[in-house]
Image (tube, helix red, strand yellow):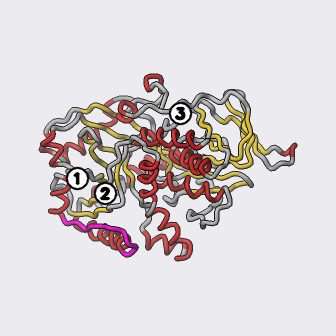
Amino acid sequence: MTSDPTTSTQPSSLWAATAVAGPDTPPLLESREVDVLVIGAGFTGLSTALHLAERGTSVCVVDSQEPGWGASGRNGGQVNPTLKHDPDELVRMFGERRAEPLIDAVSKSADLVFDLIKRHDIDCKPVRSGWLQLAYAPKDVEGLHARAKQWRKRGVPVEMLDSDAVARRVGTRAFAGGWLDSRAGAIQPLSYTRGLAQAALAAGAAVHSGSAVTSLSPQVSKGSGKWLATLSTGATVSADRVVIATNGYTGPLWPGLQSTLLTANSFIVATAPLSRAEANDILARGETASTSQRLLLYFRKDSDGRLLMGGRGFFSDPKNASDFSHLERSLELLFPQLGPLKYEYRWAGRIAVTRDFMPHIHEPAPGITVAVGCNGRGIALCTSFGKHLASRLTGGTDEFPYPISPIKPIPMHQLQRLYIAAGVAWYSLLDRFG
């Protein structure tokens, strides 16, 4: 990898400070023709490009910023192979024939991430010790154990934990119980994103930073069925197929798409490294964790023993340290034995939430594919998108597991700030009193 991290445009965060350098991805200055143009150099776009290039497809990835600039480089680094909906609920939603391939693809998504890391020797501090989902109230533990049983029925190694078992694993008596999903793990997400970019380049894909798509239109005059993308650099890309993978940073490029997503910030704080004794008592086996609240909190340790805590924040970008106080207060309530904590990093990134909390794959026109709506589960899910989209775009025989849906803008989408603010207030009340 060749780029100088000191010249990166990546926003300040723990990940930006500790990531491996990314590959050289200069702006695209000369027009070109490819089989597939991918818009967005995050997990979805880079995984799609890598898998397409490995199939011998000519592919070009463009991004207005750089690989991992958005949520792919700013998230909590948890590799969780789940959706918001439990397996049995997915069967009720889609029927068994359609649901089971979806459940299987999601279940194997963490395997795919760690297989790619191993195969391409991606230096991203991978740890695969499982994910703990935890409940504060005894009445909520039963629901988590029911979820675990649904996955166990499908062959997933799970453990159902009572309060004592959770306390031993997590290092706090705050929780009444939970479950452990052994498929899950953790990575340094920006290093992983940059590793995907390097792997895609090595496979023959082109990846270009600082190259925003300003217009996208069919090349009707040629009668070829191709699409022409005009870039902010003045160059153009002609492609048979286009994949739009912009997720939480989706703009008005494709009509109506932006109005299908509610975007909100996820805030994260990271402490100074804990002492060895302190670190050994908290998530000692390297597990990741999150709460079962509607407005969940998620936490883990990084490779240097820092404690990270993340959760939903305000709609607008944070302006000062006080915007993160709710996370710092939560972390200190969970682990009072640590005393006052020193925080070294605070940052935020934008996630895309769909109305049904499902990933959205759209095919709004011949040659156009849209993949958005990871709903905060981007590492595993979006990596999986890429593998399966590459197969679909190249005529693979594998059944495409993710539902294809039409673009349906959210009514009164312009009021989304009020939606989110009201939802945060309402769910906070339910979590507190419900």
- Magenta stretch containing residue 161, yes or no? yes
| Front tag of 3 and 1 | 1
Q: Which residue is mark 1?
A: 285
**Badge 2, how many Cα within 10 Å: few under 14, some, many 20+?**
many
Near-viewer residue (360 or 158): 158
**Residue at (52% x, 49% y) in the render:** 262
Residue type indicated by callout 2: Gly
Near-viewer residue (243 or 21): 21
Q: Position of residue 309 (x, y in %)?
A: 30, 44
Q: Are marks 2 and 1 in contact (CB under 8 Å)?
A: yes
Q: Position of residue 350 (x, y in %)?
A: 47, 42
Quarter of the image for the C terminus: give it: bottom left
How far apart are the alpha carbons under marks 3 and 1? Answer: 34 Å
Kind of element beneath mark 3: loop
Q: Which mark is residue 130?
A: 2
Q: Quadrant of residue 151?
A: bottom left
Specify the segment rendered in magenta: 153-162
Kind of element beneath mark 2: loop
Work out whether 305 lies above or below 82: above
In the image, taking residue 384 as reference, residue 278 lies left or right, namely: left
Work out whether 166 lies above or below 331: below
Work out whether 227 lies above or below 135: above
Q: Which residue is mark 3?
A: 66
**Residue at (63% x, 44% y) in the render:** 38
Answer yes or no: is residue 146 visible.
yes
Q: Are marks 3 and 2 in contact (CB under 8 Å)?
A: no
Residue type indicated by callout 3: Glu
